[in-house]
Image (cartoon, helix red, strand yellow):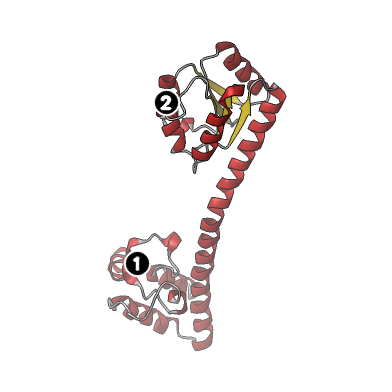
């Protein structure tokens, strides 16, 4: 999918020229000749999130509604490039302080505008990746923690040769509803089962340090060739876990 650009300004020839050059570079462009149209395009459905907005300060007030809407998007995926006439430099500086990522003073070359647009979109994509990287790393860490529990169960069976005993122990642990006051999220991965049960009840398996006890028992049964827990047993243990 090509990047989306919104070009906002009341100069029809300039606006069309910008869109034409950006389209040749592979971008999808929308035009807005006035503030009302620009606000409408910015607030329509989520499938029209813009990678870049090019706004002409000669057409829109620095403290107008469009500026306020752009200000909300500073931390989003949308980069903002403002253009202004030679006497609008102070307005451009004010825009940079409030919401804009870059500016161009008229007259400017289309080659420079396209290059700046490409750079802004590239930096925006990098910011998105940096923002999601810690979340992905945490998800991988928790997945490793859950797999470690399965491995510990398998190792225990290999040591004790008593999978039925371990299954009973897990069922007994599931019946314990008390939350350990000394446990916290930093140490929960050290426990045999997740000690912070209230947190686990609100969280999905993706964000849990321990797999559900039902899954652990079914894994144990696979080792011995037994069938998984039936619906009644699963329901009872899932309600306790």
Residue drawn at 46 percent across, 70 percent down: 219
Local crowd size for mark 1, using a 10 Å CA cut-off: few (<14), some (14–19), many (≥20)? some
> How far across and how far down the image is residue 93, in percent?
56, 34
Q: Quadrant of residue 40?
A: top left
Q: Earlier in the sequence, mark 1 or mark 2?
A: 2
Q: Is residue 188 left or right of residue 101?
A: left
Q: Which mark is residue 39?
A: 2
Q: Is residue 230 visible?
A: no
Residue drawn at 45 percent across, 69 percent down: 209
Instruction: Look at the numbered disc 2 and give the secondary structure of its residue.
Output: helix
Q: Is residue 238 left or right of residue 33?
A: left
Q: Is residue 158 above or below residue 28?
A: below
Q: Which mark is residue 106?
A: none
Single out the residue that lies furthest toward the bottom: 160
Residue drawn at 40 percent across, 20 percent down: 36
For the image, the number of numbered tags is 2
Instruction: Look at the numbered disc 1 and give the secondary structure of its residue.
Output: helix
Q: Is residue 60 above or below residue 166?
A: above
Single out the residue that lies furthest toward the top: 13
> How far across and how far down the image is residue 11, in percent?
55, 14
Closer to us: 191 or 132 = 132
Disc 1 marks which residue?
199
Q: Is residue 167 above or below residue 131?
A: below
Closer to us: 220 or 43 = 43
Q: Is residue 142 visible?
A: yes
Quadrant the C terminus occupies:
bottom left
> How far across and how far down the image is residue 94, in percent?
52, 35
């Amino acid at each position: 999918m090509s990047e989306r650009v919104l070009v906002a300004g009341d100069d029809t020839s300039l606006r069309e020229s910008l869109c034409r050059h950006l389209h040749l570079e592979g971008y999808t462009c929308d035009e807005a000749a006035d503030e009302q149209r620009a606000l409408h395009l910015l607030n329509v459905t989520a499938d029209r999130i813009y990678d870049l907005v090019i706004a002409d300060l000669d057409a829109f007030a620095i403290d107008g509604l469009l500026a306020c809407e752009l200000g909300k998007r500073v931390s989003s995926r949308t980069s903002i490039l403002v253009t202004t006439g030679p006497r609008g430099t102070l307005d451009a500086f004010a825009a940079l302080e409030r919401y804009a990522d870059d500016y161009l003073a008229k007259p400017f070359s289309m080659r420079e505008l396209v290059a700046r647009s490409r750079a802004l979109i590239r930096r925006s994509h990098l910011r998105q990746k940096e923002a999601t990287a810690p979340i992905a790393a945490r998800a991988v860490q928790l997945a490793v923690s859950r797999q470690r529990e399965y491995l510990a169960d398998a190792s225990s069976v290999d040591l004790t040769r008593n999978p039925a005993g371990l299954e009973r122990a897990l069922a007994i642990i599931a019946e314990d509803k008390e939350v350990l006051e000394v446990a916290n999220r930093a140490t929960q991965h050290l426990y045999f089962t997740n000690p912070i049960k209230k947190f686990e009840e609100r969280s999905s398996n993706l964000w849990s340090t321990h797999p559900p006890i039902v899954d652990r028992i079914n894994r144990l049964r696979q080792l011995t060739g037994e069938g998984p827990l039936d619906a009644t047993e699963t329901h009872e243990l899932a309600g306790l876990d």
